[in-house]
Image: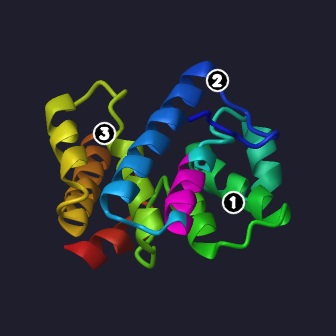
Amino acid sequence: MRLELPSWSIVTDKRRAHIARVVALLRTWAVALGLPSADVQAWSDAGAWHDALRDADEPTLRADTGDLTRPFGMLHGPAAAIRLAALGETRQDVLDAVRWHTVGRSSWSRVGRALYMADFLEPGRSFMQADRAFFASSVPLAFDQVFRQVVRMRLEWAIREGKGLAPETVALWESVR
């Protein structure tokens, strides 16, 4: 499968490889879950688009979003969702998945939850490799349980690293604990 990114994407080769691994994981899960082809496509599109602006500079992302307050690292998802909607993307679950993939969203459909997991569990990341591989292989068997564990692990990491918690992240944890 060839990875198709939007023409306006701003990604390094390393980021493109990450995106390809996320899409591959999402497709694997969607097929294993027996999802209809439209859902497989939605999951793949969300994966392909989630980091399309991850390597854009801060002025570009602030201009795209109009957001002058959130940390720079949280802007690429909303900026990509805004561009996608402006170009005619109408699948709200896909737009929400892309928009909120960094911080989470308690009202997500399965596509948002799947993207949140795939972004964390993709095999190219160097930390907790055995644990993350186990969880990735378990998604088709225990989707909701793995999602809860991923939310917990990401929350624990943010706290351990002294990162601030977005209100959306806290609401997501409250919805799954």
Q: Is residue 40 magenta?
A: yes
Residue 123, x across and y down, in percent? 32, 31
Task: Tell me the distance, in whole angstroms, between the alpha carbons under discs 3 and 2.
Answer: 25 Å
How many residues crowd around disc 3 within 10 Å: few (fewer than 14), some, or many (20 or more)?
Answer: few
Q: Earlier in the sequence, mark 3 or mark 1?
A: 1
Q: State the residue position of label 3.
A: 161
Amino acid residing under circle 1:
Ala
Q: Are marks 3 and 2 in contact (CB under 8 Å)?
A: no
Residue corresponding to mark 2: 12
Q: Which residues are magenta?
A: 38-47
Spot occupied by residue 102 in the image (x, y as percentages of width and height): 48, 52
Query: 119 above or below 169?
Result: above
Q: Are marks 1 and 2 in contact (CB under 8 Å)?
A: no
Residue found farthest to the top: 13
Amino acid bearing label 3? Glu
Residue 163 visible, this angle:
no
* Identity of the residue drawn at 29% across and 69% down: 173
Discs 3/2, front? 2
